[in-house]
Image: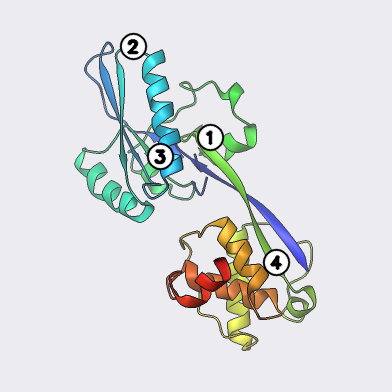
Amino acid sequence: MRAYFAMRCAAAVGLVTLAVLIGAVPRASAQEVTLEVWSHEADEPAKVAFRELAARNFEKSHPGAKVRITWYEKNPLFAALKTALPAGKGPDVFYLEPDQTEYITANYIVPLDDSVNWNQIEPWARKVWTHNGKTYGIPQEAYTVELYYNKDMLKTLGVTQGHRGNIVELKVKLLKMLRVTATVRIPAPTSRSRRCCASSVRTIIRNCSPASYLLRIHALSRFSNGSRIWSTPAPIRRIS
């Protein structure tokens, strides 16, 4: 087996793949201001508590500033932004992902090059959020994504060792190749599937019955794309 690793970065408060972007909304007073923040992770209490604590600490260190966070799950957040921003009613800071450059080209956000102490941020993390020479996001978190595969099986499909690049693109390519060659019957994946809990993933991988890791990845992708539900008996037995 071989694992390929890709570092993903979301900005915001990823934060990785998840960023915090500053809306180009003027404020009337420098003495008293409320920052409107829209973030995803509404269904992750630990992250909500962490971000809220950061907001309260910011208020303590900046008298007169208030931070109001509205919590969404990711897809509802993106839907709300697409409605609010064109109407001039968007937030001051919001979560976004690096490939969503349409917000930049539409002039909904402003560059942060002169507003952030970049000495406290890793250069590679800033680079993720640099578009046409300007930086538009503050990284909030980074994580790795691993793809395990059978080298001999994929060699027959034209995939050689040493591949480096976007892990999501590689996964999509592999699954489509397998589908075309009928090696494994797998539906074409979507580009933005919901990530499941890492501990649950590890548990399912250890306990799935198929010998091939590719089949195990397929089994997990069914949970990610919504075609199978976590609350069904089989995954419950494996996790409990």
* Amino acid tagged 4: Tyr
Instruction: State the colouring used for the structure image.
Output: rainbow
Relative to 143, is 111 above or below?
above
Q: For marks 4 and 2, give the CA distance.
A: 50 Å
Mark 3, Cα crowd under 10 Å, few <14 / some 14-19 / many 20+, is some
Measure the alpha-carbon separation of dots 2 and 1: 34 Å
N-terminal of the two: label 2 or label 1? 2
Mark nearer the viewer, 2 or 3: 3
With respect to residue 30, does 7 lie above or below? below
Label 2 sits on a secondary structure element that is loop
Q: Which residue is mark 1?
A: 133
Discs 4/3, front: 3
Q: Which circle, 2 or 1, is nearer the viewer?
A: 2
Q: Quadrant of the N terminus?
A: bottom right
User: Considering only order in the chain, which callout, 3 or 2, is on the residue closer to the N terminus?
Assistant: 3
Q: Amino acid at mark 1?
A: Gly
Residue 34 at what x, y percent from top left? 27, 23
**Marks 3 and 1: which is nearer the front?**
3
Tag 3 residue: 48
Find the distance from the CA under tag 1 to the CA under tag 4: 35 Å
Mark before the other along the chain sequence, 4 or 2: 2
Q: CA distance from mark 2 to mark 3?
A: 23 Å
Q: Give residue 170's position: percent from left, percent from top.
A: 63, 65
Frontmost of labels 1 and 4 is: 4
Image coordinates for residue 58, horizontal then vertical, percent = 41, 20
Q: Amino acid at mark 3?
A: Val
Q: Is residue 42 visible?
A: yes
Q: In the visual, does 221 lie left or right of 229?
A: right
Pick the residue in front: 59 or 27: 59
Disc number at residue 148? 4
Q: Earlier in the sequence, mark 3 or mark 1?
A: 3
Q: Which residue is mark 2?
A: 63
